[in-house]
Image (tube, helix red, strand yellow):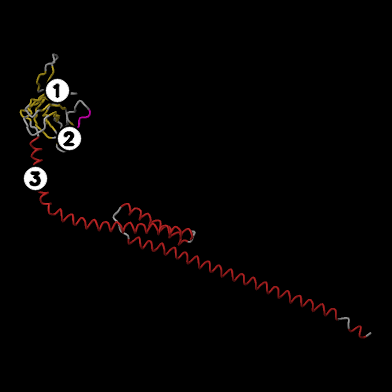
């Protein structure tokens, strides 16, 4: 009886050992899980750090590439306006892209591709400018040789040009027509149609200018257009009937009052030019100038009361 009673507590002890074993196993499992999670976290941190390093390195590489291009840009020099405009545009693109990269809000892969494209364009400018410089050197050398060759005939050429200019001046001077016996006055037209000279401004209806266009064997024969300018007492030009009444004379452009075409055959000819008044004339002195081929051929004046 005593032995049977002593053996009864053993099942409770076995259950306790089993529970302890289960706890130990669970603890081991949790430690293993924690170890795995910690290892994964470390791997992720290492990967992130490696990615950050790679991104930073790529960013630095792109930035340096752009900075090197700006340095190279500063060494380029050209007087070609078209090239200079293109290079200035390229410089702005480089600066803009570098700012985007530095701010870190731009895709580095795209930035790298754009930087490579800009670098190729920059190389193209370098090659073009170098070719132009070489061409300029060759042209300069050729110009030196040409100047040396031309130097032998420069004196003769200048002498011939001077002589030719003198001859042209003499011909131009000799070909200018001249008017003699130039007289101008106002006219009053009677009901019969007869023109009567008048010195009264209230009666003046026309102005007549007559002269003798002298002989000139140097000028070319043919039609000559004579322009008459009548300048009133107030300094203004009496207007022509036609609206297009401007011509060149004495190196300027101005108005004429009347014009007439004359068939000139190098011999003296009498000419009269008439101007018809469009309103009442005022008293005072009137000046009359006549031009042909922009040169003055004669001048006179008259007075009205």
Where residue 271 appears, as percent x and y from the top left, is 10, 25
Q: Earlier in the sequence, mark 1 or mark 2?
A: 1
Where residue 258 appears, as percent x and y from the top left, is 16, 27
For the view shown, which residue lies furthest in the top direction? 192
Where residue 88 appears, as percent x and y from the top left, is 35, 55
For the view shown, which residue lies furthest in the bottom direction? 2
Image vertical order of residue 293 relative to residue 68, above or below: above
Alpha carbon separation for disc pair 1 and 2: 25 Å
Is residue 287 visible to the viewer in this orientation of the structure?
Answer: no
User: Quick one: SS at disc 2?
Assistant: strand
Residue at 73%, 75% (x, y): give it: 25
Q: Earlier in the sequence, mark 1 or mark 3?
A: 3
Mark 3 surroundings: few (<14), some (14-19) or many (≥20) residues within 10 A: few
**In terms of depth relative to the viewer, which is nearer, 205 or 100?**
100
Q: Earlier in the sequence, mark 2 or mark 3?
A: 3
Q: Identify the image quadrant of residue 122.
A: bottom left
For the image shown, how many numbered marks are present on the structure? 3
Q: Identify the image quadrant of residue 67.
A: bottom left
* Residue at mark 3: 163
Alpha carbon separation for disc pair 2 and 3: 28 Å
């Amino acid at each position: 009886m005593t032995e049977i009673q002593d053996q009864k507590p053993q099942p409770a002890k076995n259950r306790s050992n089993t529970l302890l074993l289960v706890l130990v196993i669970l603890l081991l499992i949790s430690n293993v899980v924690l170890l795995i999670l910690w290892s994964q976290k470390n791997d992720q941190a290492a990967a992130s750090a490696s990615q950050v390093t790679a991104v930073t390195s790529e960013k630095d590489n792109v930035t340096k590439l752009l900075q090197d291009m700006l340095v190279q840009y500063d060494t380029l020099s050209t007087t070609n306006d078209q090239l200079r405009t293109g290079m200035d545009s390229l410089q702005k693109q480089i600066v803009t892209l570098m700012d985007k990269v530095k701010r870190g809000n731009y895709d580095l892969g795209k930035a790298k591709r754009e930087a490579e494209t800009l670098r190729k364009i920059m190389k193209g400018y370098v090659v073009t400018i170098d070719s132009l410089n070489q061409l300029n050197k060759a042209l300069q050398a050729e110009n030196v040789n040409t100047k040396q060759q031309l130097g032998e005939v420069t004196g003769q050429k200048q002498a011939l040009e001077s002589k030719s200019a003198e001859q042209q001046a003499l011909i131009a001077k000799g070909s200018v027509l001249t008017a003699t016996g130039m007289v101008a006055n106002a006219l009053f037209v009677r009901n019969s149609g007869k023109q009567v000279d008048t010195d009264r401004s209230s009666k003046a209806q026309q102005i007549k200018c007559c002269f003798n266009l002298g002989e000139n064997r140097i000028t070319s024969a043919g039609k000559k257009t004579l322009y008459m300018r009548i300048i009133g007492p107030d300094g203004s030009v009496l207007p022509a009937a036609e609206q297009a009444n401007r011509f060149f004379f004495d190196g300027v452009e101005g108005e004429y009052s009347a014009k007439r075409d004359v068939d000139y055959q190098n011999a003296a000819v009498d000419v009269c030019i008439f101007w018809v008044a469009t309103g009442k004339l005022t008293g005072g002195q009137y000046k009359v100038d006549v031009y042909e081929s922009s040169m003055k051929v004669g001048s006179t004046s008259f007075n009205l009361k």
